Amino acid sequence: MPGARPLVIVGASYAGAQLAASARELGFEAPIVMVGDELHAPYQRPPLSKGLLTGKTTADKLALRGADFYAQNGIEMRLGRRATFIDTVDRSVTLDDGSVLPWGWLALATGARCRPLPVPGADLQGVLNLRTLDDAQRVVAACDRARNVVVIGGGFIGLEVASALRQRGADVTVIESQPRLLARSFPPQMSEYLEAAHRARGVTVACGRGVRALHGTDGAVDRVELDDGSNVPCDLVVLGIGVVPNSELAQAAGIACDNGILTDAMGRTSAPGVLAIGDVANMALATPAGGPARMRLESIQAANEGARAAAAVLVGREQPFSAVPWFWSDQYELKFQMAGLALPGDRAVLRGDMATDRFSVFFLRDDLLVAAHSVNRPAEHMLARKLIAAGVRPDAHMLADPLFDLKSLALPVSNP
Ligand code: FAD
């Protein structure tokens, strides 16, 4: 479309790459410029805390799209460049080299960054974050030398790091400030199962313990001081204490933000012509009664589905994000798959035997199936996603009965 102002996408990762791809699939013809402050073309992040750390995969296998994809689809890449200013009146974005890009549509796909650890010693050598490929390569290099690793934060990423580094033979201690692992997303029985799984494989888990300071010798970390005064010796610390959204650029431009950039279910922000997608977007959700009205979903699926919804906006269609959220985590030989959003107070129903490392926990809210967490049950998980989307109200005893065929719940009820 000659003369059309471009779609400028800030952030070259999952959400940005999917938006560009979906826009072209839907026939969006204006130029597309993708700006990313990392030097790498969009790459997969999940292996950074899994296969890349265990050595099962390598950095050259992580590209999200083939090398020719962007050029072939008329997507101009500006990598190693940071967007520093948005003008929503003149419709332009300024980059850190002083260049100014006009836009017809602007998409903010700036993701999130690691939350800093606010204690003395957090800047010592050997204290590492894990968000980017460069971060992961620093962790890989450090763990070649490290014997004693402390992982601060018992969330998914911290636990995946613990699992990977343990498999590499390191002694690993996980420090979690909450009384149990994954307290916000897992029910107590899943947290107990997870903790036992890590302990059984030789990881030390300390829940309900804060970090008071990190100490070192010659500038390099050598112990973590806990809030009970005890010390954990270490030669590597990996932080996994969550992320903060990269929403400052939007905020400075006057775009409504609150724990991320506020959007509707199609990625539209408070500023006309400006979309926000992926980890940075605090998106309106169509969840069952009692569920959150909006949320920043930090997952590949949300980045991709949110990008598809936003691409529809670009071509004048309305296709709100309505998918059941799902997420996965690989730890040791355990594949965790989560679908839907469970809340405290939902009734948890166990199907299977935790001792076999193959089971699901289903969550009922007023009899409505709202979420399911599975371990090494991929087929059951896929079915659970469908059942959640279908809004079924299963009998709890049937759910718990391993002989009951869950597929029958997906069948339409025939009229007498
Ligand atoms: P990001 O991937 O964060 O990308 C945003 C990009 O924008 C970054 O490159 C950033 O540097 C860039 N940027 C920011 N500001 C600017 C600016 N001003 N100018 C230019 N560029 C800018 N999800 C799952 O579903 N399953 C998993 O197993 C899983 N494992 C994970 C493991 C790790 C180690 C990590 C870090 C994440 C994992 N996730 C997983 C989460 C998933 O990777 C994120 O949800 C996803 O990357 C979000 O994509 P995004 O495009 O919104 O943002």
Image (cartoon, helix red, strand yellow):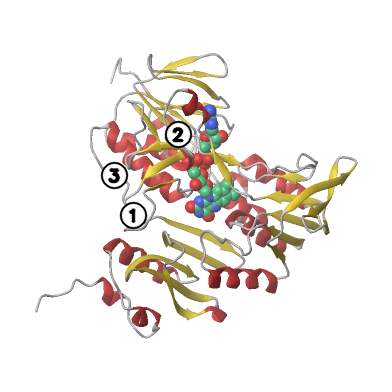
- Which residue is tagged 1? 287
Does residue 88 show up? Answer: yes
Residue 296 placement, left or right of 183: left
Does residue 65 show up? Answer: no
Q: In the image, which is nearer the foreground, mark 1 or mark 3?
A: 1
Identify the secondary structure beneath mark 1. loop
Image coords of residue 311 (percent x, y): 32, 36
10 and 251: which one is in front?
Answer: 251
Image coords of residue 292 (percent x, y): 39, 52
Decide: few, some or many residues near mark 1? Use Cα within 10 Å; few <14, some 14-19, many ≥20: some
Which residue appears farthest toward the bottom when viewing the image? 403
- Which residue is tagged 2? 257
Look at 34% across and 68% down and name the residue there.
369
Q: Earlier in the sequence, mark 2 or mark 3?
A: 2
Image coords of residue 255 (percent x, y): 42, 28
Q: Quadrant of the N terminus?
A: top left
Q: Is mark 1 within 8 Å of ligand 1?
A: no
Decide: few, some or many residues near mark 3? Use Cα within 10 Å; few <14, some 14-19, many ≥20: many
Q: Tell me where residue 146 sits by quadrant.
A: bottom right
Q: For the residue marked with disc 2, what is the amino acid?
A: Cys
Q: Is mark 2 within 8 Å of ligand 1?
A: no
* Disc 2 to disc 1, C-alpha distance: 21 Å
Image coords of residue 243 (percent x, y): 58, 44
Q: Earlier in the sequence, mark 1 or mark 3?
A: 1
Look at 58% across and 32% down and name the residue there.
38
Identify the secondary structure beneath mark 2. loop
- Which residue is tagged 3? 320
Identify the secondary structure beneath mark 3. loop
Residue 152 placement, left or right of 184: right
